[in-house]
Image: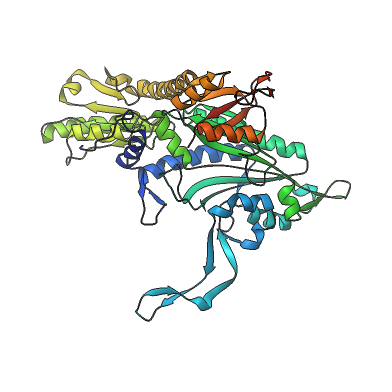
Amino acid sequence: MSKKITKRSEDFSKWYNDIILHADLAENSGVRGCMVIKPYGFAIWEEMKAVLDRMFKDTGHVNAYFPLFIPKSFFTKEANHVDGFAKECAVVTHYRLKSGDAGEIIVDQDAKLEEELIVRPTSETIIWDTYKRWIKSYRDLPLLINQWANVVRWEMRTRLFLRTSEFLWQEGHTAHATEKEAIDETKKILFIYKQFIENTLCVPVLHGLKTDSEKFAGAEKTYCVEALMQDGKALQAGTSHFLGQNFAKAFDVKFANKEGNLEHVWASSWGVSTRLMGALVMTHSDDNGLVLPPNLAPFQVVLIPIYHNQEEYDKVTSCLKDIGNDLRQNNIRVKEDFRDTHKPGWKFSEYEVKGVPIRITIGPRDLQNQTVELCRRDTLTKENILLKNITNIVFDMLEQIQIDMLEKAKDFKNKNTFIVDEFDDFAEKINAGGFVLAHWDGSPETEEAIKKQTKATIRCVPIDIEHESGKCIFSGNPSLQRVVFAKSY
């Protein structure tokens, strides 16, 4: 295989793009700023969807679908929300094309919409217009809805998976009778995201609150999970928002409580997107290609025969088919690559780039010895094992790879998390990359000044560490606790 991947140490951005392209995850499309997710990349996303969807349903949520188009007037009902998304909106103004005088296709100016339609950047407005019809009584609550959809946020500078004009995601929208229930829901989803990202993607995350300047447009509070990539930059991996009664009041969504009095409902919204694919690549991959956690790999084991003639081919592939059947009976996802159009070395490189967790090869000599060779993608180590033990060994190895990948990523995060008290030390650590815990006086002016000088933003205000009084690293004013700074994507 002739695909050459740029080294991380030479050009991290190009290395990232090389991994995505050579591993057949995605490519740029004919529409500027949009991507094509290729079958292998989409298979990984489908695994993510399957795990997360089950976690939602296990906690009482159900799926629905809402329109892609949102009347412009809906956005005017929640001022902060429209301000937050106004510069990213794609707008539909006409509904018909026609042939021009020169035979070209042009917009029919007589087919102008009475009201412009916004292509969904997020669905709060269209959903709360719907909830007004669904919610009448406390008996209708809580309403726990999720949708899997595409959204459009117009971007001028794009990067595959991390920032594209159209991307895939899930967005949850819930309605509750009390403020406490809505806040509890917001936190519940935050920890579902944390559990999912760490246990399935093997990506360790910090969790906490966004500052007011960084919170979701229209939210009272935004909770987030933040991951650290191998270049030392942070990536926002998921958000969960407590919306208060803002959207309920904007769309006049009320319910009759048990006493018969009308109240506005309380709300949350939350989402993760195909940005997680970028997190997966940048957390685990190496200079040889993608490295996939077994829980996400479209196929966890690839079987490759070694042979010199048809007789050897028949014998070794027969043995590999038996191995494949045994592994599948143990719910292990297997790919058999018995093609005679490519040599074994080419196949080794192909599946190494694609990050398949375990490669099993067998040749004539292995058949004689009743052994097979196993290669782990995460460590690139090989070992020969007895054929009779293979199913148990593969099962245990997949579990160990999942554990080891998370521990390796945790070790990287811990080694690149720093506590500082002086601004010079802060600036040095920020430039080097990593999470930096430092005191902040709580003012948006200081937050903006630090961002302007260092390009670092407050990734989150941690909710799982004790408050510790100190002095702000920038202003010297009193601070009640440290917050997490980093440069970010």
318 to 65, vertically: above or below: above
From the viewer's perspective, is residue 125 above or below residue 457?
below
Q: Nearer the viewer, residue 227 or 332?
A: 227
Where, by quadrant of the figure, is residue 129 drawn?
Answer: bottom right
Q: Position of residue 74 (x, y in %)?
A: 66, 59
User: Front-most of 73 and 323?
Assistant: 73
Name the residue at 47% across, 41% down.
275
Residue 154, compared with residue 327, is above or below; it is below
Q: How many marks?
A: 0
Residue ranking furthest to the left: 309
- In this view, the residue in front, 309 or 449, is 449
Q: Quadrant of the N terminus?
A: top left
Q: Position of residue 440 (x, y in %)?
A: 63, 26
* Res 477 seen here: yes
Give the percent coordinates (x, y) of residue 230: 41, 28
For the point 52% across and 36% down, the residue is: 237
Q: Which image quadrant for residue 295?
A: top left
Which residue reaches farthest right?
Answer: 259
Which image quadrant is residue 364 in? top left
Residue at x 54%, y 31% (from the top left corner): 226
Q: Is residue 231 left or right of residue 440?
A: left
Please, which colouring scheme is shown? rainbow
Give the camera-side residue of 51 and 162: 162
Specify the farthest residue to the bottom. 101
Image coords of residue 136 (percent x, y): 78, 54
Residue 331 visible in the displayed image: no
